[in-house]
Image: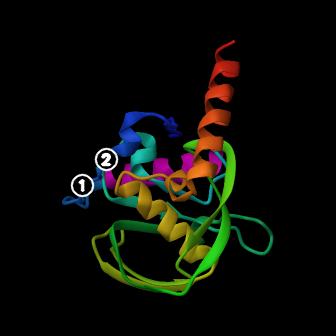
């Protein structure tokens, strides 16, 4: 089932998500719905809070060489924690909760993440490049933050002005 993606400035996006304690069919349904929602919105990642569920759950599915996001490449991460990060890279990011806006963000180049899969089995992933960016972006959502908070003061002011204008136009 495709769920509604909440957008900035919805206050739920500021919530710090809580750890999952039950790995059950309810969790599996949420993960399946999140995948359908992410694909429907043409995203590469989605945190549960973006569908108004304040749990430490995120999914990432990068497109392959044919630009297909197949479910076999899907990463489902429950209660993820970054245990190591180093290096620096700049990527142009966008967000399903801030539609139509992209900006360059500086992140770690290389990360190690520990998390649980849908069955509650512990996983460790070491990654870099775009996948590391996606991990860091989605994990910010779990702590109640958005990528726009990483922007410089001037870029943030410009964003706020453009965003208010966009919301006014949508109401007309």
Q: Position of residue 162 (x, y in %)?
A: 68, 35
Magenta stretch: dominant secondary structure: helix
Q: Is residue 78 left or right of residue 167?
A: left
Residue 28 appears in which quarter of the rendering? bottom left
Q: Position of residue 87 (x, y in %)?
A: 54, 87
Q: Is residue 70 left or right of residue 118?
A: right
The disc, 1 or 2, on the residue closer to the chain's N-terminal end is 1
User: Is 156 contained in the magenta span?
Assistant: no
Q: Nearer the viewer, residue 16 or 73?
A: 16
Q: Position of residue 95 (x, y in %)?
A: 59, 51
Mark 2, residue position: 54
Position above or below: 66 against 165: below
Disc ID at residue 145: none
> Mark 2 and mark 1 in contact (Cβ < 8 Å)?
yes
Q: CA distance from mark 1 to mark 2?
A: 6 Å
Q: From this viewpoint, is residue 74 visible?
A: no
Residue 24 appears in which quarter of the rendering? bottom left
Magenta-colored span: 27-40
Q: Quadrant of the C terminus?
A: top right
Q: Point out the residue furthest to the left here.
A: 21
Q: How many marks?
A: 2
Name the residue rendered at 62%, 80% in the picture.
Answer: 129
SS category of the residue bearing label 2: loop
Name the residue rendered at 80%, 70% in the picture.
Answer: 66
Mark 1, residue position: 18
Residue 99 appears in which quarter of the rendering? top right
Name the residue rendered at 56%, 67% in the picture.
Answer: 134
Graded by Cα atoms within 10 Å as few (under 14), some (14 to 19) or many (20 or more), the crowding at tag 1 reads some
User: Is 35 contained in the magenta span?
Assistant: yes
Q: Is residue 96 left or right of residue 67?
A: left
Q: Position of residue 110 (x, y in %)?
A: 52, 86
């Amino acid at each position: 089932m495709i769920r509604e993606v909440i957008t900035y400035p919805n206050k739920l996006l500021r919530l710090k998500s809580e750890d999952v304690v039950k790995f059950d069919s309810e969790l599996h349904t949420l993960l399946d719905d999140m995948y359908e929602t992410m694909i429907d919105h043409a995203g590469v990642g989605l945190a549960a809070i973006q569908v108004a569920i304040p749990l430490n759950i995120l999914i990432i599915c990068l497109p392959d060489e044919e630009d297909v996001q197949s479910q076999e490449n899907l990463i489902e991460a429950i209660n993820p924690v970054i245990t190591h990060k180093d290096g620096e890279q700049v990527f142009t990011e966008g967000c399903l909760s801030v539609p139509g806006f992209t900006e360059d963000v500086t992140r770690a180049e290389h990360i190690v993440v520990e998390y649980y899969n849908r069955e509650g089995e512990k996983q460790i992933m070491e990654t870099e490049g775009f996948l590391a960016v996606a991990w860091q972006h989605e994990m910010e959502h779990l702590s109640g933050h958005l990528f726009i908070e990483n922007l410089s003061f001037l870029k943030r002011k410009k964003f706020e002005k453009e965003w208010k204008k966009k919301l006014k136009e949508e109401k007309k």
